[in-house]
């Protein structure tokens, strides 16, 4: 499979190069040159198969020509072997038309593990093959960081630097990162928001000298391999609910647009998805976009769902590319406008294209707390505040069969759960000692040069 940049100014690459590049050299994001097909026969054949088997089959066309099928299947099986449920992504019915897809049974209790457990192994393999070592840098709104650390810790060919917004991630999220004592793991608490952290990471990649010298690699959701791995659970959920014969909708708690874009990709590949509901918190740039066609970042508001406290949704550029009929020049123009004027407006055609599949729904903290309480009362299930956004947004689907993506385990967000239910929720046994372990973290200002200097210095101490 060959990959093209959404901005049309970077060379086409194969999977291995895309994996290491992250961002394209023209500032765009990579997408496969053509979407592989999931035929009705293939979908029917997935029924009753193990998650890792379906995963290898769904992802294989994306790595074709770069990784032999047998080796890839073994890598994928290893990635999901550590999940604490045999089903890996179990589906639980909440009411007559609503299902919860539990994506929080991986090592760090959020859906990010699905992609990062694969990505860590893919990177390790590719680096080993090339005899290279890299500096992994990533920004996290809370869950990416711990998932990336869990996937990359103790791998000798990677130094890992994770930037998180100081004081804006939950204590459990923070401790899942800062209590890891592996020598190759460095946690940076940045004075700023997640968008600031993300801008710092983008700034590092845009600095060609720094990028080359440090051999930067990205684990953020701009990395195609992450989107690729996230396509799989849309497939397993839809198949469990009757695909290829019955269509289903998905409601997706959304921040960076990576998870819901994977749903879009699944649909393009032939999965019968009739609606993708973008659920946001008060940081509702995507909902406003779907209403008006104007993409206009505002200041980030802290909410009970910190992993969605994002205004600049990186992966949205991938949808722009598709909604403009893959016109890279149009995407480059819009992104130029965004950089120059802080906003852009898409054409009526492009907006209609997006609206044909996507609905948007903003869910405020009060509604999140009410939803957590209501779901506990009516279904006996405790959900986290991000998943609660998805459930509240799914109500907009008005009774059509809908799967809500359960993006995190409720124990990751005990403060919100306590406020909604008046009780604590215990961490799973494997993590019971988290709150007592010593932490290791470096505080740094929101300043690119300072962060670069820190990384330059530390990455050389191997
Ligand atoms: C990352 C995250 C999200 C947002 O996912 P995107 O791919 O950035 O849209 C939602 N919920 C949780 C719990 C997350 O960790």
Image (cartoon, grey):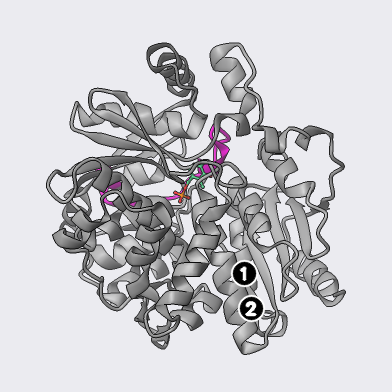
Q: Is residue 106 left or right of residue 424?
A: left
**Quadrant housing residue 448:** bottom right
Image point (35%, 58%), residue name: 54
Q: Residue furthest left?
A: 245
| Chain part drawn in magenta | 290-308
Depicted 72 relative to depicted 90: above or below: below
- Give the residue pinned by disc 1: 203
- Give the residue pinned by disc 2: 207
Q: Position of residue 404 (x, y in %)?
A: 35, 36
Q: Position of residue 142 (x, y in %)?
A: 62, 45
Q: Position of residue 307 (x, y in %)?
A: 55, 42
Depicted 65 relative to depicted 259: above or below: below
Q: Do the numbered discs 2 and 1 sit on residues whose CB atoms are within 8 Å?
A: yes
* 37 in the magenta segment: no
**Dot 2: what SS?**
loop
- Foreground of the two, 353 or 401: 401
Mark number, residue 25: none
């Amino acid at each position: 499979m060959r990959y093209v940049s959404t901005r049309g100014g970077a060379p086409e690459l194969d999977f291995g190069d895309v994996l290491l590049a992250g961002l394209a050299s023209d500032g765009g994001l990579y997408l496969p040159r053509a979407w592989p097909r999931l035929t009705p026969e293939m979908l029917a054949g997935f029924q009753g198969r193990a998650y890792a088997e379906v995963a290898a089959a769904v992802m294989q066309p994306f790595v074709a020509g770069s990784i032999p099928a047998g080796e890839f299947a073994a890598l994928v099986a290893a990635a999901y072997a550590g999940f604490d449920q045999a089903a890996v992504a179990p589906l639980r019915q909440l009411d007559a038309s609503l299902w919860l897809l539990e994506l929080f049974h991986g090592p760090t209790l959020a859906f990010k593990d699905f992609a990062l457990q694969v990505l860590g192994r893919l990177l390790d393999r590719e680096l080993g093959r090339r005899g290279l070592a890299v500096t992994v840098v990533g920004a996290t709104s809370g869950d990416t960081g711990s998932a990336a650390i869990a996937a990359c810790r103790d791998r000798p060919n990677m130094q890992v630097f994770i930037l998180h917004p100081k004081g804006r991630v939950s204590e459990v999220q923070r401790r899942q990162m800062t209590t890891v004592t592996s020598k190759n793991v460095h946690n940076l608490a940045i004075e700023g928001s997640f968008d600031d952290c993300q801008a710092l990471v983008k700034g590092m990649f845009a600095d060609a000298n720094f990028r080359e010298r440090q051999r930067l690699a990205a684990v953020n959701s701009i990395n195609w391999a992450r989107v690729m791995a996230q396509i799989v659970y849309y497939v397993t959920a839809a198949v469990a609910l009757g695909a290829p014969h019955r269509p289903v909708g998905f409601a997706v708690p959304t921040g960076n647009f990576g998870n819901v874009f994977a749903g879009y990709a699944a649909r393009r590949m032939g999965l019968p998805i009739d609606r993708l509901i973008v659920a946001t918190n008060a940081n509702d740039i995507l909902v406003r976009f779907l209403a008006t066609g104007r993409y206009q970042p505002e200041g980030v508001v802290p909410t009970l769902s910190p992993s969605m406290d994002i205004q600049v949704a990186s992966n949205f550029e991938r949808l722009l590319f598709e909604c403009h009929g893959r016109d890279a020049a149009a995407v480059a123009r819009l992104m130029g406008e965004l950089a120059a004027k802080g906003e852009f407006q898409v054409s009526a055609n492009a907006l209609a294209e997006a609206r044909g599949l996507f609905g948007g729904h903003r869910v405020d903290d009060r509604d999140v707390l009410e939803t957590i309480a209501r779901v506990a009362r009516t279904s006996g299930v405790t959900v986290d505040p991000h998943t609660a956004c998805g459930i509240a947004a799914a109500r907009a689907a008005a009774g059509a069969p809908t799967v809500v993506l359960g993006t995190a385990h409720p124990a990751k967000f005990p403060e919100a759960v306590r406020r909604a239910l008046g009780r604590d929720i215990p961490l799973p046994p494997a993590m019971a000692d988290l709150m007592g372990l010593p932490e290791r973290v470096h505080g740094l200002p929101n300043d690119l040069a300072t962060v670069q200097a820190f990384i330059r210095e530390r990455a050389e101490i191997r």
